[in-house]
């Protein structure tokens, strides 16, 4: 029997320290919900999960971008719907003015409404904005119909976490000059007849522009749906790597708790065996 080096006590204390450290890790994982709280827990897993988290953040923002883009296209389509309504009214006025039962004074009244409607179309083209971004344009210097005149700068939507994932949508000028309606008149029967095909062309042109907005909106919706599925799968994959398996961790916690209590008991027992030496000295 030796007393200078209590080997059983040292061994019990060493095992107690191991059990205590493991128990602390169990408590940390159970309280945080993460299996990996620091790089030492799983260096490779931490690196992979951080890359996944970065992609997930990009996916989350891309989904918000898609929703903003859908709102942008819906706002533009709403404005164009009103332009369509005014063009339909113009067509009615033109056909009405082309009727031989109207005199000059009546046609001038119809022409006054025509001018008011064209002014309103110009105003819509000038002032329609979404969060400070102009939806259309108005350029009286260009007399081409809408299908042949597009502003130089497209609206670019970022629809993915990488720089390459973008969707560009053309913006069209909306105005009486661009729709080739600024030279129309309802003042005479001949002028009214000449205006009818121009108005019909403008109606078709606006329909084409609305189709552009609608196609972009549908594509953005599909892009959003794809991002949502990808985001869900990425979150699931990241959780598999980083999140705590609670059932497994509780089992490990119970084991380490028992070992710690056993180590404490054995450390006390190892220290008590030294007291037997005192019995020999009595």
Image: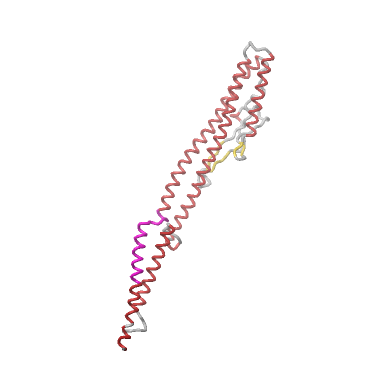
Task: Give the prevailing secondary structure in the magenta stretch.
Answer: helix
**Quadrant showing the N terminus:** bottom left
Residue 204, given in percent of the width and then of the height, sits at 56, 25
Closer-to-camera residue (24/193): 24
User: In this picture, which residue range is highlighted in magenta?
Assistant: 240-263
Query: Is 271 placed left or right of 89 in the picture?
Result: left
Instruction: Residue 149 in the image: state x and y as whole percent.
Output: 61, 31
Q: Is residue 34 left or right of residue 147?
A: left
Residue 266 lies left or right of residue 186; in this view the side is left
Question: Which quadrant of the figure contains the C terminus?
Answer: bottom left
Residue 248 included in the magenta stretch of the image = yes
Q: Is residue 158 above or below residue 143?
A: below
Residue 153's quadrant in the figure? top right
Find the residue positioned furthest to the bottom: 282
Q: Is residue 212 above or below residue 112?
A: below
Quadrant for residue 81, please give it. top right
- Residue under the point 62% across and 13% down: 99
Q: Residue at x 35, y 84 (%)?
A: 3
The colour scheme applied to this rendered structure is secondary structure
Q: Is residue 60 above or below residue 100?
A: below
Numbered disc total = 0
Residue 56 placement (x, y as % from top left): 47, 49
User: Quick check: 15 left or right of 215?
Assistant: left
**Where is residue 200 shown, x and y percent of the image?**
58, 22
- Decide: is 7 above or below 141: below
Is residue 15 one of those drawn in magenta? no
């Amino acid at each position: 029997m030796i007393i200078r080096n209590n080997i059983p006590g040292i061994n019990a204390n060493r095992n107690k320290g191991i059990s205590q450290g493991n128990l602390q890790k169990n408590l940390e994982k159970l309280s945080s919900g993460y299996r990996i709280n620091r790089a030492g827990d799983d260096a490779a897993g931490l690196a992979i999960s951080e890359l996944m988290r970065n992609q997930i953040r990009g996916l989350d923002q891309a989904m918000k971008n898609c929703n903003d883009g859908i709102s942008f296209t819906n706002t533009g389509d709403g404005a164009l719907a009103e332009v369509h309504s005014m063009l339909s009214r113009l067509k009615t006025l033109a056909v009405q003015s082309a009727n031989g039962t109207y005199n000059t004074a009546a046609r001038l009244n119809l022409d006054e409404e025509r001018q008011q409607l064209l002014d309103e179309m110009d105003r819509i083209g000038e002032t329609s904005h979404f969060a400070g971004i102009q939806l259309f344009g108005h350029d009286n210097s260009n007399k081409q119909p809408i299908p042949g005149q597009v502003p130089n700068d497209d609206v670019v939507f970022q629809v993915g976490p990488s720089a390459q994932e973008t969707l560009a949508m053309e913006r069209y000028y909306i105005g009486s000059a661009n729709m080739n309606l600024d030279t129309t008149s309802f003042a005479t029967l001949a002028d009214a007849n000449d205006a009818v095909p121009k108005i019909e062309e403008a109606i078709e042109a606006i329909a084409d522009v609305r189709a552009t907005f609608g196609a972009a909106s549908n594509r953005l919706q599909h892009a959003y749906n794809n991002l949502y599925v990808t985001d869900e799968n990425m979150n699931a994959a990241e959780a598999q790597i980083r999140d705590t398996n609670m059932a497994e961790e509780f089992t490990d916690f119970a084991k380490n708790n028992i070992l710690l209590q056993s180590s404490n008991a054995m450390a006390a027992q190892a220290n008590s065996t030294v007291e037997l030496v005192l019995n020999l000295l009595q």
